[in-house]
Image (tube, coloured by chain):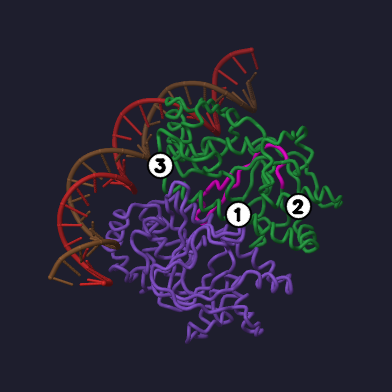
Chain colours: A purple, B green, C brown, D red
DNA sequence: CGCACAATTGAAATTAATCAAACGATGTGG
DNA sequence: CCACATCGTTTGATTAATTTCAATTGTGCG
């Protein structure tokens, strides 16, 4: 299932060829790739690029489609009755957005572009037709995908309540690193497209704390953080930090907090 | 949809008649009630009662069935790679257990009885057959149910990261109160079947902190807490506490943290 | 260039965790 | 039936972590 290190390169990210994409572990994605393979016309529409700050959809919008991130990045955000906001995830290319809206028929959170980005749109009605045609496949896939999200939500829950702030940030950075790796980009040097404020909100910390933590991780020689540019110097050390064990990382790569867990 | 205050009474809880049960907003439940109404034989089996401490299933167990709580109460619990445990929810009669296992084919957490309890078992294969026969109905229902859980998980996430410990406990107690209300039991006086330790773990706090918080809420005249017995004296005040506003509750009943959100 | 916003830094205050101990209920075996 | 061990709960004192307040610096953008 995992095609990591298989040597297949994705030269043009705009070309949706999930067949060779290792992020397809997010199984619903196959809907997109299969539709392309089977030449199902009109299933997927390509929208025009979005600018930073633009919303793909707002909380309360009618749910009509699922979205696949083609380029750029997004954050999803949830506002409760008291007006309090919670960043629920960050999303990069190949991530699927909009599933949250299936239940109430309306999106339960908003999704906003963090930079110039583009998506593909899959009308849910069409998805349903496809899934009814190939029931044993897609029917299960969707459930799997959503169910899998619950599993990740669990993990996130634990991460946010059981570990200290420093570990949270380390976990968060490792998760992004992991997701970059899955996208065949460098897991050691990448862009952090979101604001410190978003990271703080997501991790349940004060902005000042996040800022201080970046500094501390830097002082310990684990990372070099300059604004939206991150360089992971000592990934093993960062792992140790994330798990609470200072020396000797016991956890395999890819076991940390998932920033894309809910959304 | 909501049958609250409709005057219909559920005299025998052992008789599964979700038709008249207001907790059927948890829509998957209809599978149980419909199956009974349609006389689908063998769909639901009634297991023998479980004792306190017994596990309905363990983390890693093969996923085969969904369960409906008939009586008693349960806690669900998740153990991560490092051995750290996180209580992910508490479950009372009419709650559905086991959905978490759909994706990986194995249960991602364990469920344990908090007292003498009983459940009904719905083999998932049978559920699938039913759902294929009546596709537009049940197919959507399951997705709705799981998707709805995500929505609640969101809320829980926010509750655990954005608000103070005192508010968390207040929120937690109000959620149980709400769930008692939905079950047509008194929302002001009820049993707290779980240990303080479980509450602490669930809320991401130390046991000592939880104990002190109970005391503080009591000193403020909001509750009377004795062991596993809880009496809510000032529910409006408790709401104010939960939302952070000390005076003047702005939030409608039923908007607080859901202790059954994940699982 | 300067404005507005984002990020950093420092100091003080607050919250919750930890350490340590006592208390209470429950259950067991003598 | 009572002493005893055990587990869960409560309480107190102390420590550590994180927030809050306040001020400064840095950055992007018109």
User: At 43% from the left edge and 49% from the top edge, which residue is drawn?
Assistant: A83
Residue D11 on image: x %, y %: 40, 25
- Tell if the residue under mark 1 belongs to the same chain as the one under mark 3: yes
| N-terminal-most mark, 3 or 2 | 2
How far apart, in angstroms, are the residues tagged by discs 1 and 2? 16 Å
Residue D28 on image: x %, y %: 27, 71
- Tell if the residue under mark 1 belongs to the same chain as the one under mark 2: yes
Look at mark 2 in the image and give the residue it sits on: B31
Vertical position of residue A261 compared to residue A158: above or below: below
Chain of the residue where label 1 is placed in the rendered structure:
B
Query: Is D22 displayed left or right of B263 in the figure?
Result: left
SS class, disc 1: helix
Circles 1 and 2, Cβ within 8 Å, touching? The answer is no
**In the foreground, A231 or A227:** A227
Look at mark 1 in the image and give the residue it sits on: B148
Look at mark 3 in the image and give the residue it sits on: B164
Residue neighbourhood size for the residue with mark 1, other residues' Cα within 10 Å, grouped as few (<14), some (14–19), many (≥20): many
Chain of the residue where label 3 is placed in the rendered structure:
B
SS class, disc 3: loop
Chain of the residue where label 2 is placed in the rendered structure:
B
Query: Is B106 displayed left or right of B247 in the figure?
Result: right
Q: Is residue B199 magenta?
A: no
Residue neighbourhood size for the residue with mark 3, other residues' Cα within 10 Å, grouped as few (<14), some (14–19), many (≥20): some
| N-terminal-most mark, 1 or 3 | 1
Residue neighbourhood size for the residue with mark 2, other residues' Cα within 10 Å, grouped as few (<14), some (14–19), many (≥20): many
How far apart, in angstroms, are the residues tagged by discs 3 and 2? 39 Å
Circle count: 3
């Amino acid at each position: 299932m995992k095609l990591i290190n298989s040597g297949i390169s994705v030269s043009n990210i705009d070309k949706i060829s999930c067949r060779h994409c290792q992020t397809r572990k997010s199984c619903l994605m196959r809907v997109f790739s299969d539709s392309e393979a089977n030449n199902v016309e009109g299933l997927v529409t390509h929208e025009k690029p979005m600018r930073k700050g633009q919303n793909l959809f707002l909380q309360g919008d009618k749910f009509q489609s699922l979205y696949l991130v083609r380029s750029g990045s997004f954050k999803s955000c949830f506002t409760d009755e008291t007006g309090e906001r919670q960043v629920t995830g960050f999303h990069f290319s190949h991530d699927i957005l909009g599933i949250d809206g299936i239940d109430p028929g309306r999106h339960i959170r908003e999704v906003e572009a963090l930079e110039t980005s583009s998506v593909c749109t899959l009308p849910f009605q069409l998805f349903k037709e496809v899934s009814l045609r190939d029931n044993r496949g897609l029917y299960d896939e969707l459930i799997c995908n959503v169910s899998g999200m619950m599993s990740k939500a669990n993990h996130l829950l634990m991460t946010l309540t059981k570990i200290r702030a420093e570990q949270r940030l380390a976990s968060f950075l490792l998760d992004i690193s992991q997701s970059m790796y899955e996208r065949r980009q460098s897991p050691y040097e990448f862009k952090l497209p979101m604001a410190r404020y978003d990271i703080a909100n997501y991790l349940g910390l004060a902005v000042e704390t996040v800022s201080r933590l970046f500094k501390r991780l830097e002082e310990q020689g684990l990372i070099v953080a300059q604004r939206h540019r991150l360089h992971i110097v000592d990934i093993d050390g960062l792992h140790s930090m994330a798990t609470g064990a200072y020396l000797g990382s016991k956890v395999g790569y890819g076991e940390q907090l998932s920033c894309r867990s809910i959304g």
